Amino acid sequence: MQKVLVLYGSSRENGNSEKLADRVVEGLGATKIYLREHAITPIHDKRHTEEGFLPVDDDYDRIVHQMLAHDVIIFATPLYWYGMSGIMKNFIDRWSQSLRDRSLSFKEKMGQKTAYVVMTGYDQAKLKGLPLVQQFQHIFEFVTTTYGGYIIGEGNKPDDILADASALFEADKLNRLLRGETAQSSFA
């Protein structure tokens, strides 16, 4: 069975995106990382300077090593102001540092992974979340990660996602795919 990691980008515990992602990985023994529980310093971009990136004393490297040790990565984020959460964006911005760290072989290892996006939002999220899906597609393409698909759920208040039958159906379908019960072409 593939090793699955969920990166939760919500600042709210037990929020809608978290519940939808949990449904996707139910029974899979997935590793769960709640970015809100970790210190990840914003990037200080020095890629065009002689000293380059300097080591940073935070949780980022530990999370990246965990991410690189998994086969499937699920990026779960609420749709905040029509984009990913700041917590998740901050984490992904730091990938610039990882790309320059030759000891990680970051791009090579990311090229061996499949990524999915799970998000929830309000205000026509299934339409207005599509630019964020596209942003993730571009990110995955840049680091040569296979893009597996996405789920967008509608929800604002706590537990609203539990009333979105189509998102729950898609979550169950992705769960079956990750269990190996259905073919890849049956999702996304």
Image: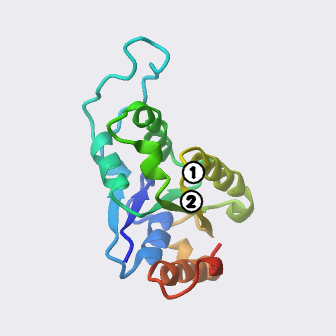
Mark 1 is surrounded, within 10 Å at the Cα level, by few (under 14), some (14 to 19) or many (20 or more) other residues, namely many
Count of number-bearing discs? 2
Q: Which residue is mark 2?
A: 146
Q: Which residue is mark 1?
A: 140
Residue placed furthest toward the top = 50
Residue in front for this viewpoint, 66 or 160: 66
Three-letter code for the amino acid on which mark 1 is drawn? Phe
Residue 62 image point, x, y percent? 27, 46
Residue 46 image point, x, y percent? 44, 19
Mark 2 is surrounded, within 10 Å at the Cα level, by few (under 14), some (14 to 19) or many (20 or more) other residues, namely some
Residue under the image location 39 percent in, 42 percent down: 105
Q: Left of 130 or right of it: where is 33?
A: left
Residue in front for this viewpoint, 13 or 152: 152
The first of marks 2 and 1 along the sequence is 1
- State which quarter of the image contains the C terminus: bottom right
In the rendered structure, are the residues bearing label 2 and label 1 in contact, judged by CB atoms less than 8 Å apart? yes
Three-letter code for the amino acid on which mark 2 is drawn? Thr
Residue 77 image point, x, y percent? 51, 56
Residue under the image location 32 percent in, 37 percent down: 103
Q: CA distance from mark 2 to mark 1?
A: 7 Å
